Image (cartoon, helix red, strand yellow):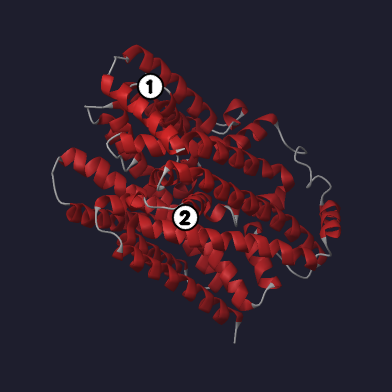
Amino acid sequence: MSNEFYQAISITIYMAGMLLIGWYSYRKTSNLTDYMLGGRSLGPAVTALSAGAADMSGWLLMGLPGAIYVNGMVDAWIAIGLTIGAYLNWVLVAPRLRSYTQVANDSITIPGYLENRFKDQTKLLRIVSGLVILVFFTFYVSSGMVSGGVFFQSSFGVSYHTGLLIVSAVVVAYTLFGGFLAVSYTDFIQGLMMLLALIFVPIIGVFATGGPSETFETVRLVNPNFLDLLKGASFIGVVSAMAWGLGYFGQPHIIVRFMAITTVKEIKSARRIGMTWMIFSLLGTILTAMIGIAYFKKNPELTLSNPEAVFIELGQYLFHPIIAGFLLAAVLAAIMSTISSQLIVTSSALIEDLYKVLLKKEATDKHYVLLGRLAVLTVAVVALLLALDQDNTILSLVAYAWAGFGASFGPVIILSLFWKKMTNWGAISGIITGAITVILWKQAEGGIFDLYEIVPGFLLNAIVAIIVSILTFKQNDQIEKEFNESIALLKEEK
């Protein structure tokens, strides 16, 4: 039997498992809070790994190892920045956001939390936030679908459009029916698959390249600068790479996990699990790239046409086809976990933050859950249509989507949790400033404009939000009461 046959079996088992989880979650979903936030019932392990899997996407198994394979350890600064940012996100944002969203009218979305936190009677804050999420995530989902189509095309030789439809159909099915629980449970499994893949490929690979010392000596022969974090690095380059960590504070599909954990007390356990997963995964990614350099140097008859496929190619050469198939499934898991997380957050923005606010209609939870599923389907169809052409403009938009969300929501989220005198007008001004700065900065080139756009966007958002809040602050007893209640709940549950 051919390698492709064994690999197809592995992929089929994986996809069937994802659909089974979707069916199980469908049985446990009865109201809108269940569908959008899992009834705040996630345990620490599911919270941690689902947040990690939703975050990393195909970047972890393809983008980063490909960059390090080409440029060496100088591209590992981004991993360092992300690790620091993720840790600070768990410490600073997670516990306070979990307690504050419970106190602030049991908020189940980020725009809903912001409106409740600032008692925004204009509804403008919720609408602006919902629109930012809706627009950026539709393109983000489309990019994920493009990645899935390319994955099937390169791995199995099927057409791009066939791969696109397979990935879209499976991920939409379990997200549409199972909602947030399905997304979180599948992300948990996908996170485990990604971790195991990034542990076993380097372990087996290092034996194939002669052991640790010989492997790194071979890397030095290829390029003596590849093991140096600073060779080839510029100040702006290092700052830009480290600044990726700022993005964590404003990613709706990641911080919504903090709102869904059962209690504040479990966040410490979730943080330990999540950070352990992240550190091992990133180390595995870096080692995979280094081993790949040594492996292809020692086996010159083998060619690597695409550096971003170094993880996939190593898996094919080092393992039996059935195991290699599950390694391919881990790459697919990285892609699908992010698509599903973005779909459910976009669905919640459409229904909870735009439909209910703009139409002001009261209906049953069953009605809203049905609308939530229709929203998932609608966003997925639009994203699929955008992905049909593999349009590069979509992929270029996603290149700064992380910066867009981080600069739009990050400073506002942090200030809202730590500064009781922040106002709704400060939040609205900050979100708009951050988004516009990122978009405009991305269009410029050269000199200071080579700095990653999240840095100016984040800083200007914070400055504008603080100044406008000082100018528009009025004492509000209810806001002060809820702020104090959230701190009290935090202390009580710790």
Could you say which quadrant of the image residue 484 lies in?
A: top left
Q: Nearer the viewer, residue 6 or 4?
A: 6
Residue ID at (51%, 48%): 270
3 displayed left or right of 252: right
Farthest residue in the bottom direction? 1
Residue ID at (42%, 47%): 257
| Residue 154 vertical position relative to residue 320 in the rendered view, above or below | above
Q: Residues within 10 Å of mark 2 (few under 14, many from 20)?
A: many
Three-letter amino acid code at the position of disc 1? Lys
Q: Residues within 10 Å of mark 1 (few under 14, many from 20)?
A: some
C-alpha distance separating marks 2 and 1: 31 Å
- Label tally: 2
Residue ID at (47%, 66%): 160
Can you tell which mark lies on residue 420? 1
Three-letter amino acid code at the position of disc 2? Val
Label 2 SS: helix
Q: Position of residue 306 (x, y in %)?
A: 64, 60
Q: Earlier in the sequence, mark 2 or mark 1?
A: 2
Q: Nearer the viewer, residue 150 or 45?
A: 45
Residue ID at (15%, 41%): 359
- The residue singled out by tag 2 in the image is 46
70 displayed left or right of 209: left
* Quarter the N terminus occupies: bottom right
